[in-house]
């Protein structure tokens, strides 16, 4: 069903309100804008598939209310971008959420499995991806586009039922649901300009004080990009911001001597300079810590190798992707007693206690038939 009229949308939302599960996907474009342009919403219950056209509809509040109904599980595949798009367009983050890509890793399937591969694995259906790069802003949409869009949600309710059944049988549903809650929390805070610096690239060489400068510079860039609805890189690049944080230029002339900043007009240069100077005089104590790729010391490198070998054993024993269980950075943090995902929850119960035994010399590793095993 292709929905372009308010009455059609209201009728669908009324029917969907009694469903236990609502599968959702979106088509959008964002190459030339800050805010993603929502072009199509695909939604499916167990009984019907609806394609909602936000370009034809001025009011999507009925669907927004459906997304906010916490009695309905919203099922996505790889939901992070969809959550961001829906939040920007409708002002609501769907909850509760179930992400089939995340759930797949708890069922022994590979990390970041694509939707088509998962449908083939669980439903035995091969999906064509011929419309993946379509221009979804163009109207009318073709029959091939509509078929492709329907397929993106058609199988999600069935896969959700199958996954929940298998996760419950394996006593892993309690592991998965907190991961889904974390996706919602991230979507709700993603647009905070004061946290934009956490996504800044090439910051590993910056000092704590320089990170404080980066926070203000990135917040300024987010505000400008949002006001003008342009990609943040069109305002100023990550490389320029990082170099500005190192130099802290005093005036526009010094700023423009940084390669890539010479195109800034007087107003933009003044705004960036104010942000840099504000950051340089700020108290850095309240700046959230960034996750950095820190090279282990020679003393800890060997311990980390053993910890990672143990992690691979535990992951294999439990039919989990090793990356889902712990990364080397997670292990490094745990070894140095810094905050880590291993500190609590299912990862702690499954892995951390064994790591403690390894680090305390209460267990060891050996090689048998070419494979590393626990002693």
Image (tube, rainbow, N blue to C red):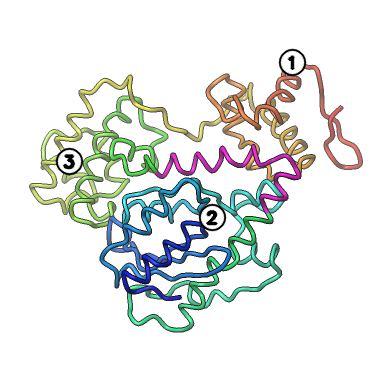
Q: Earlier in the sequence, mark 1 or mark 2?
A: 2
* Local secondary structure at mark 2: strand
Percent of width and height locating residue 26:
43, 63
Q: Main secondary structure of the magenta part?
A: helix
- Seen at 36% across and 65% down, the residue is 10
Percent of width and height locating residue 128:
58, 76
**Residue named by callout 2:** 75
**Residue named by callout 3:** 272
| Residue closest to the far left | 266
Q: Are marks 1 and 3 in contact (CB under 8 Å)?
A: no
In the rendered picture of this protein, how many numbered marks are placed on residues? Answer: 3
Q: Vertical placement of 5 versus 41: above or below?
A: below
Quarter of the figure with the C terminus: top right
Q: Are marks 1 and 2 in contact (CB under 8 Å)?
A: no
Region of the chain picked out in magenta, as a range? 163-187
Percent of width and height locating residue 142:
42, 83
| Residue closest to the far right | 369
Residue at mark 1 to residue at mark 3: CA–CA distance: 51 Å
Residue at mark 1 to residue at mark 2: CA–CA distance: 43 Å
**Residue named by callout 1:** 360
- Seen at 59% across and 53% down, the residue is 101
């Amino acid at each position: 069903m292709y929905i372009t009229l308010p009455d059609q949308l209201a009728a669908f939302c009324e029917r969907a309100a009694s469903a236990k599960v609502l599968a959702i996907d979106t088509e959008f474009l964002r190459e030339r804008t800050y805010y993603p342009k929502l072009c199509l919403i695909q939604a499916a219950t167990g009984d019907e598939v609806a394609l909602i056209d936000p370009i034809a509809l001025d009011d999507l509040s009925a669907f927004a209310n459906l997304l906010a109904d916490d009695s309905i599980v919203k099922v996505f595949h790889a939901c992070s971008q969809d959550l961001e798009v829906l939040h920007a367009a409708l002002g609501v983050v769907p909850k509760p959420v179930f992400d089939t890509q995340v759930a797949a890793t708890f069922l022994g399937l590979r990390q970041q499995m694509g939707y088509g591969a998962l449908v083939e694995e669980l439903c035995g259906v091969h999906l064509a991806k011929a419309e993946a790069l379509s221009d979804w802003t163009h109207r009318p949409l073709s029959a091939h586009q509509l078929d492709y869009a329907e397929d993106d949600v058609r199988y999600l309710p069935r896969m959700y039922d199958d996954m929940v059944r298998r996760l419950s049988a394996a006593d892993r549903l309690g592991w998965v649901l907190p991961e889904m809650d974390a996706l919602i929390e991230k979507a709700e805070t993603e647009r905070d300009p004061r946290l934009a610096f956490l996504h800044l690239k090439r910051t590993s060489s910056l000092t704590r004080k320089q990170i404080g400068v980066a926070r203000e510079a990135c917040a300024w860039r987010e505000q400008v990009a949002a006001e003008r609805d342009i990609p943040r890189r069109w305002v100023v690049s990550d490389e320029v911001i990082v170099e500005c944080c190192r130099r802290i230029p005093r005036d526009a002339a010094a700023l423009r001597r940084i390669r890539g900043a010479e195109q800034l007009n007087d107003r933009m240069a003044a705004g960036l300079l104010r942000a840099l100077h504000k950051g340089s005089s700020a108290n850095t104590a309240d700046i959230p810590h960034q996750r950095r790729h820190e090279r282990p010391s020679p003393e800890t490198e060997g311990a980390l190798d053993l910890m990672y070998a143990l992690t691979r054993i535990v992951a294999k024993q439990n039919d989990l992707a090793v990356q889902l269980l712990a990364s080397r950075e997670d292990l490094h943090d745990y070894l140095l007693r810094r905050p880590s995902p291993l500190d609590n929850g299912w990862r702690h119960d499954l892995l951390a206690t064994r790591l403690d035994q390894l680090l305390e010399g209460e267990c060891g590793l050996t090689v048998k038939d070419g494979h590393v095993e626990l002693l």
